[in-house]
Amino acid sequence: MSLRTPLARVRHLGSARDGTRHWWVQRVTALALVPLTLWFVISIISNLGADHPALVDWIGNPLTATLLILLIGATFYHAVLGLQVVIEDYIHDKVARIATLLLVQGLGFLLAVIGIISVLSILF
């Protein structure tokens, strides 16, 4: 039983104290992913049948590399935000929740860094 009033419990936007920002960031990343994904799909379709050197040249273009890096960053950030909500909603044990959140955030960061470094290594 809590000694806090109902107003005191809701004043800080829930347990994370950052619900509105989290919601907005997820919507903004989703909005950014729409044109980036469309560009990526169209680019892949236009490069169907291309050989390895042609794809390396395509990725080596600074505009293409920049858009790929933005796509990788936005995709993994959006995925981590979405998984965080699912984990917070469905894992009730505090230790398991924290461990799973750390695992998902670490894995998302690691995979994003690997993808970005891969694009940069082709670019330079």
Image: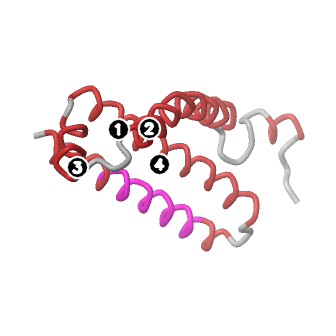
Give the farthest residue toward the front.
49
- Give the mark nearest the N terminus, 3 or 2: 2
- Give the mark nearest the N terminus, 4 or 3: 4
In this rendering, position of residue 104 left or right of residue 95: left
- Give the mark nearest the N terminus, 2 or 1: 2
Q: Which residue is mark 2?
A: 40
**Spatial CA span between label 3 and label 2:** 18 Å
SS type, badge 4? helix
Residue 90, how many percent across, how many down? 75, 64
Identity, as a three-letter code, of the amino acid under mark 1: Leu
Q: Which residue is mark 1?
A: 68
- Give the mark nearest the N terminus, 3 or 1: 1
Query: Residue 94 or 48: which is nearer the viewer?
Result: 48
In this rendering, position of residue 28 left or right of residue 14: left
Q: Which residue is mark 3?
A: 117
| Magenta stretch bounds | 98-113
Q: Residue at 49% of width from left, 44% of height from top?
A: 75
Q: Which disc is residue 76 wearing?
A: 4
Q: Which disc is residue 50 wearing?
A: none
Main secondary structure along the magenta-highlighted residues: helix
Q: Are marks 2 and 1 in contact (CB under 8 Å)?
A: yes
**Spatial CA span between label 4 and label 3:** 14 Å
Q: Residue at 34% of width from left, 50% of height from top?
A: 49
**Spatial CA span between label 3 and label 1:** 11 Å
